[in-house]
Amino acid sequence: MSTPHLSVQLYSVRQALGHDQDGTLARLAGLGLRNVEVFDFVHRAGELAEALDRHGLSARTGHAVLLSPPAHSAEGTAPAPTLEETFSAAGRLGLEMVIDPFVPAARWSDEKEIARTAALLNEAAAVAADHGIRVGYHNHSQEFVHSFHGVDAFDLFAGQLDPEVVLEIDVFWAAAGGYDVVALLERLGSRVRALHIKDGPIVEDPFSSGAPLDPATLGQVPPGQGRVPLDAALAAAPHATYAVIEFDHYGGDIFEGIGAAVGYLNDKGIR
C-alpha cells in the first residue's frame, strides 16, 4: 500500500481563479498544497503551466472531455479540441493522467451506449499512449442508478475498459443513494488511481431527473464532517496515486474549507 499524493481540483476555486489567478494559486500553495488537478486547460496550457510554476505547484492530473466527438462550435468561440490537441496540451503541463469528468445520465441507461462510452475511452487511451499519458474516467452518481443482468452500469462499463485506462472515483458521488462505495473500491482494486475526497450528506442521484443541479443544495462540508465513509474509502483504495480535494460548492470561505481538508488528509500522512 502506498500513500497517495495530496492535490486539489482547481474547479473548487473557479470563481477565485477567474478574479485573480496568481493570488488564488498563491493561497493554495500557502495551505501546503504542491499538486493541483486542472480543468479547462487545453487552450491555456502554456499560461497555466507558467502560473503553476511561479507558485511551486505541479499538475499531474487534469479533466478534459474525451468521450464525445468534437462539436461544431458556436460562432465566435474556439473549436472543441481534438484528442491530439488535448494530449499535447496535457504534455506541456506535465500531466500523467487526463480524466473525462462527466458522461450524461441518458448514456448510462442503455447497455449499447455504455459499451460505446467504453470504446471511446479505449480509443482515447490509444492516442494518449503516444504522448506518454494515461486516460481515465471520473464518476458522478448517474453511473450507479441502472443495472443490467444483475451488474450495475458502472461495473459493466469498467469491465469493458482497456487495462491501461484508469479510474478516478469521486467518493461523495459514488456514495449517493446509499451506494456502497467501499465495496466498489475493493472490486475495482488497482484500476483506481485517484480519489476525489469530498464529504457531506448522503444525497440522492440528482442527474437522472434532467432538472438543473444547484450545487448549493448538496450541503458539502470539509472531509470528516459529513456522512461519506472517507476513512474506509481511503483504506479500500491502496493503489490510488492522488487524493484530490474537491468541493462542488462550499457555503463558507472556500479556502477555509480546503484548509480543513488539507488538515484532515495531512493527519493521515497524505501530503
Image (cartoon, helix red, strand yellow):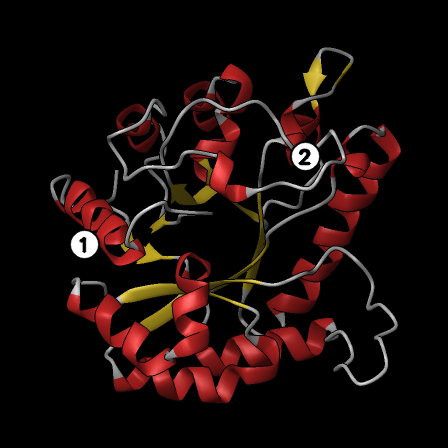
Q: Position of residue 238 (x, y in %)?
A: 32, 36
Percent position of residue 244, x then y: 36, 50
Most distant residue in the top direction: 150
**Residue 43 can be seen in this image:** yes
**Dot 1 amino acid type:** Arg
Viewed as shown, does residue 170 lie left or right of 99? left
Residue under pointer 2: 207
Tell me the residue at 80%/28% (across/down). Answer: 109
Residue shown at 84%/75% (left/top)? 73
Q: Secondary structure at mark 1?
A: loop
Q: Quadrant of the C terminus?
A: bottom left
Q: Label 2 is placed on what type of residue?
A: Phe
Q: How many marks?
A: 2
Which element is circle 2 on?
loop
Q: Which mark is residue 271?
A: 1
Quadrant position of the N terminus in the picture: top left
Up-down relation of residue 39 to residue 67 (above or below): below
Foreground pick, 234 / 262: 262
- Place residue 15 in its image quadrant: bottom left
Q: Is residue 74 above or below residue 261?
A: below
Image coordinates for residue 33, horizontal then vertical, percent: 22, 63
Q: Earlier in the sequence, mark 1 or mark 2?
A: 2
